[in-house]
Image (spheres, rainbow, N blue to C red):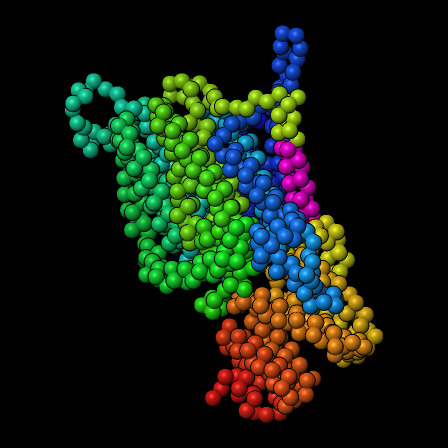
Amino acid sequence: MGISPLLFVLLAPLFFGAVHVWSYTLLFLVILTLAFVLTLNNITREKGKNHEAFFLIFPKTPLALLFMLMSAFLLLQMTPLPEFLLGAISPTSLKIWREAISAGTSSPIISDVGWRTVAPYIYPVRMSLVRWIVYGMLFLAITQTLNSRKKIETAVILLLVVCCFESLYGIMETYSGHNKIWWYKLTKGPKDVRGTYINRNHFAGLMEMGIVLAITYAAALSGKRTGKSSPARKSGFKDILLSFFSSEGHYTKRFLVIFSGVIMALGLILSASRGGIIAAVFAVFILGIFLSRRRDQKHKSIIVVVLCVLTIAYALVIGIDYTLGRFELFDRAYEDRAALTDSTMQMFDDYKLMGIGVGDFTYALGKYQTERHRKIAPEYGHNDWAQLLAEGGVVGVAIVIIGMALYLIATLKRWLAQSDPFAIGLGLAPIGALGALAVHSYSDFNLHIPANFMILVAIVAIGHNALYLEGRNGRKDIKTPHYHLALKGAGAIVLFVMMIMIFWSGMWCIRHFVSEAYCHTETNATLNLDTDPLPESIRRAIAWDGENAAYDYKLARYYTDKRNGAAPIHGPGTQKWEEYGGLIMPALRSAIFKNPLNAEYYVRFGFEYYYQWNKPDYGTNVLPMADLYMEQGSDVAGNSAENTRLFVDMGNYWLLRAETLGIGTKASEEAWEMALWHYYKALKLDNGDTIREEIARNVRDVYHNEDRVREALLVE
């Protein structure tokens, strides 16, 4: 099958970093198909003395333990556990489940929740497991197909070509003023070089890995120096430089590889990604240290010097004022991200052992945001290390640290034992790439971008195979260690598990894609899909992927908008209003049960209870339930900018309750205090004229008192 898996991986950066459903679904399905074919090809029949037997053969890698443990961990986060065990592992998750299950019941809080999962929202964890399996299968596919030096070199050259194209394309689009990624017009950061990535920091992550690959490949091409000079003679800088560029007749190739690194370094600098530049410098420094520590490789450290000198020279000619200007704002940016990291660590405090669920961070962050981030609604923590703690807890982080430590130890042992220049050079590529992303992950989220994770997997696989070259200068094929399992024993179990993983992941890739085609919920600006489909399309989406709570909420919002549009004719208390309520409430209840981390679901559900004026137990049971869901919504809302409108709505609700409880009564004053609290939160998040006018109008309609209006607007 050659290098076909890598060929498809090279498309990922070109497809906007593969962040959209249509792009990553296509690539994932191709990778899983190739993994399936390769797995079947790994079944061999061998003849013994008296019989034939079937065996399963697949690569033995130091990353196998990490893959298996993390897969099991993600599966555990989605597995229902008995109430007593869930309470011991994650008391906060148990509390959330109790509040969610109470939706639509006559009891404020359910005491018995039955068997529930550690992750409050299963859908993101499931998609995380799908991605993790795809990445694991990709690693196995690449390690099996890159089985010779020629194939490895071809793969490296193709990766460098794609990275150089990304850099040149980004520079051209930025400095020409065109500012497009294919057909998609960029509206932010017109001075930032970003290739075909929407986010400059993720483009920077690709450049970091490309620079590492260029340096290590140039080192791999530079063989041991030979000559008749005396061992005691020390060559000068000129002799080392000439030897470096001319040894073994690789002058042209070595120069082009270094120059490709310069092109990528220029793209990185012009992206103005501060974290990316710092991470790349760290990776280059690490590579220089490793090369200089080996006596037979010390002269190769000049590669780093040459690349840095050429990059600085070109950068000074082009101009780096914009990039330097961004570094002047480094302190403020650091403080902002440090505050977001503090919020992330508060989430970790609530889910210390097992985390909130890998992928659930986005949905839970609002509760933990501080007012420092009141103007933004980040989807990620901009610190993957802190986010890993919040999503995976101590157990998840321990799995990653132990798994990576074992891999690095095994890789370094193999690298130190190697004498082949090609293996020594490319064998460092995984260490450099992992080091760069580890540093960059302190301030960004590159590993959440499918394209960058797949490129990282490819580089790790290339480095792993390069370390198993046999023969002088890699003239023989690569002989990586393999498992050789009889299908009558352990091989059958391994084969069954691998096939289950492949088919399960493929099934959910397809179902997720079809459901998103019917009802778009993920970021997909490049295709401009309809964000407000008809109920028929939403129900089809739910049929294909019923775990996505956003579909249920879109259904509820559709009927809410229809009902509100007919309100002048069919107002609250009418039969038509109740008919709409019969469609809205089940959808909201389902959304809350699937994703109890979304504040808006609770607030809308509370309003639906408030509107049930015709119920005989309206005052004794219905209204208290409405109050309860408003309080739960307030608890979950936090300080996210997305919830500004929500705090106004909750303030309006408590203003209405103050009126229904009788102006002047103690209960009414308590409701008024609740209204004020929510109005104040909204004004802190957004003190704009529109919100102030709405609050003033609503308060004036209820109290007819300008003193109350000034109190609500924080006016002395």
Please state the extent of the stretch shown in magenta in the rendering. Answer: 497-518
Q: Nearer the viewer, residue 469 or 67?
A: 67
Q: Is residue 500 magenta?
A: yes
Looking at the image, residue 278 sits to the left or right of residue 582; the answer is left
Please indicate, yes or no, whether residue 252 appears anywhere in the rendered image. Answer: no
Please report the residue visible at 51 percent of the width from the left and 53 percent of the height from the top: 352
- Residue that appears at 53% across and 78% down: 680
Relative to 290, is 62 on the left or the right? right
- At 49% from the left and 30% from the top, the residue drawn is 61
**Most foreground residue, 198 or 176:** 198
- The percent position of residue 109, horizontal first and vertical second, equals 67, 65
Q: Residue furthest left?
A: 233
Task: Reply above or below: 119 against 291.
Answer: below
Q: Considering depth in this image, is 370 or 561 the residue closer to the camera?
A: 370
Numbered-mark total: 0
Q: What is the quadrant of residue 601 in the picture?
A: bottom right
The answer to whether residue 218 is above or below residue 547 is above
In the displayed structure image, the side of residue 432 where residue 668 appears, left or right: right
Assign the magenta stretch its main secondary structure: helix
Percent of width and height locating residue 540:
75, 53
Residue 493 visible in the shown view: yes
* In magenta stretch: residue 183: no
Q: Residue furthest right?
A: 575
Please say if 292 is above or below 18. Answer: above
Does 371 appear above or below 267? below
Foreground of the two, 228 or 494: 494
Taking the spot 65% from the left edge, 44% from the top edge, the residue there is 509
Q: Quadrant of the N terminus?
A: top right
Residue 93: quadrant of the picture: bottom right
- Direction from residue 349 to residue 81 in the image, left or right: right
